[in-house]
Amino acid sequence: MNSMTEASQPVDSKAAPLVVGIRFQKIGKLYHFDASKEPELKPGDYAIVETSRGVQIGQVVQRLAEPPAPEHGSWKAIERKASAGDLETYKGWQKKEVEAMIECRAAASKLKYDGVKIVKAEYSFDGKSLTLLYNTEGDQEVDLENLRKEMQRMYTKSKVELRRIGPRDVAKILGGLGACGLESRCCSTFLTEFSPISIKMAKAQGISLDPAEITGMCGRLRCCLIYEYEQYVEARKTLPKRGKDVVTPLGRGKVQDIVPLKQSVIVYLQSDGKRAEFLKHEIEPWDELEALRRKAEAPCDRHENGGCDCGKANYSDKVKTDD
């Protein structure tokens, strides 16, 4: 009976597709594709896919058990799992990329394109597209049409394109020592995308605004400024600001500095002119305590002409008593 019931249940013909995440660069953005045609694809495998920049080969880094809904239409299907021959072809294109980059640098020098840095060359997997990535000094726009034509003349079998990238992307590609002394920069080690960084992030963390302290090797604000920024913002919400009068176990004082992650403040004590550190639970705001004191000492404003039963003396009675 149970077997008949199970057999009679309808089969869902619209099963969820197998979606995999693929990267085209070692530390690059993740793109999602439908791998239903290759259900055995696993992280570490390579696959051939069609992209807006032509046919590409990328590495599978994840299989999604619950894939998000695609932004437009449906997920693009992968062409096939890369074979051993495909991987050899890929290595061959990588060698040619280095050659194309060197040729482009020589051509740029010959054409007197000062201030233009050719950073990398990228071939599509089928070799039909050759993209040359470059950067310029400052924000100046440079017309590189003559350079593109020269490279197109040299590489007739590929469509040549020059694409400008920012200084952060340049640092990501070139790699090298980080400003903090680590052997690899964050951008070339694990950052797949760049977040907006602002000077207020350094201020919130009490970091020196000296350019040498907050500027990365790319010449922009360091990406690491964002790592602990939210924790500092949340910690500061519960601490008094600098210049605030507080009451401590050693007397009244003024907040001179804040240690957010430790949840403590440095206070200048009025009694002996020294500085001392107190945890958040050891201090109280002086203005709030003063307001409570004044309220406690104020006459009753709810009972007129005597007869107060709330613990406060009527103001007129108090005046008579004082007289």
Image (cartoon, rainbow, N blue to C red):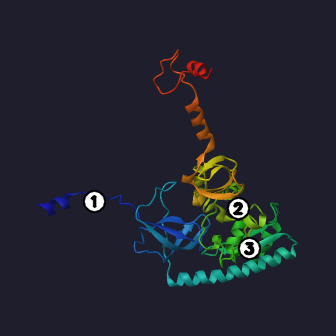
- In primary-sequence order, the first of circles 2 and 3 is 3
Specify the label residue 207 is tagged with: 2
In the structure shown, which secondary structural element does the residue marked by tag 1 occupy?
loop
- Identify the residue under disc 1: 11
Asked if residue 275 lies left or right of residue 150, the reply is left
Q: Residues within 10 Å of mark 1 (few under 14, many from 20)?
A: few
- In primary-sequence order, the first of circles 3 and 1 is 1
Q: Residue at x 81, y 69 (%)?
A: 116
* Rendered view: 168 above or below 87: above
Image spot of residue 224 (x, y percent):
65, 65
Quadrant holding the N terminus: bottom left
Do labels 3 and 1 touch, CB within 8 Å? no
In the structure shown, which secondary structural element does the residue marked by tag 3 occupy?
strand
Mark 3, mark 1: which one is toward the viewer? 3
Indicate the amino acid at tag 2.
Ile
Do labels 1 and 2 touch, CB within 8 Å? no
* Rendered view: 115 above or below 183: above
Q: Disc 3 to disc 1, how far (Cα)?
A: 53 Å
- In primary-sequence order, the first of circles 1 and 2 is 1
Q: Disc 1 to disc 2, how far (Cα)?
A: 61 Å
* Rendered view: 292 above or below 259: above
Instruction: Tell me if residue 179 can be seen.
Output: yes
Asked if residue 308 lies left or right of residue 234, the reply is left
Q: Nearer the viewer, residue 228 or 15?
A: 228
Quadrant holding the C terminus: top right
